[in-house]
Amino acid sequence: MQKTIGTRLVYNGQLKRWEGQGDNCVFLWMTDATFQGYVTAYLAVQGITEPTRDQRVDAVQHCRALSYWEGVQDPNIRILRNQGGH
């Protein structure tokens, strides 16, 4: 199993979800379908409706950044924050 500590989401094949833990003690996870929906939306905002493989890879890399998810309010994205303020 891959470690998820860092600043990027990784795909957990066992649980079939994207997940990541940031340095600020936040743990975030979502289904692959939710993640892929955000990748598609990100491409659309860029004006790309039929992405090339490279464009899709770039969009996935962009969306893997934990900072991309700051402030996102979506019940399909689970966020656990450290209540100790670390």
Image (tube, rainbow, N blue to C red):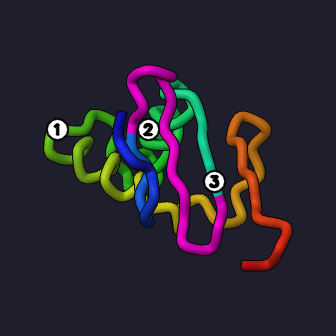
Q: Is residue 72 magenta?
A: no
Work out how far the residue at label 3 is from the one at label 2, CA to CA, in angstroms.
23 Å
Work out how far the residue at label 1 is from the one at label 2, CA to CA, in angstroms.
12 Å
Residue position for label 1? 52
Secondary structure at numbered mark 2? helix
User: Over which residues does the magenta segment extend?
Assistant: 11-26
Q: Residue at x 43, y 42 (%)?
A: 39
Q: Amino acid at mark 1?
A: Thr
What number of labels is visible?
A: 3
Residue 63 sits above or below residue 30 on the image: below
Marks 2 and 3: in contact by CB < 8 Å? no
Residue position for label 3? 27
12 with respect to 79 (left or right):
left
- Work out whether mark 1 precedes mark 2 in sequence or the reverse, and give the earlier one: 2
**Image quadrant for the N terminus?**
top left
Secondary structure at numbered mark 1? loop
- Work out whether mark 3 precedes mark 2 in sequence or the reverse, and give the earlier one: 3
Work out how far the residue at label 3 is from the one at label 1, CA to CA, in angstroms.
31 Å
Coordinates of residue 38 in the picture (x, y in percent):
52, 42
Residue 49 sits above or below residue 31 on the image: below
Residue position for label 2? 40
Coordinates of residue 40 in the picture (x, y in percent):
43, 38
53 with respect to 76 (left or right):
left
Marks 1 and 3: in contact by CB < 8 Å? no
Q: Is residue 18 magenta?
A: yes
Q: Amino acid at mark 2?
A: Thr
Nearer the observer: mark 3 or 2; the answer is: 3
Mark 3 surroundings: few (<14), some (14-19) or many (≥20) residues within 10 A: some
Q: Residue at x 72, y 50 (%)?
A: 79
Which one is in front, 10 or 14?
14
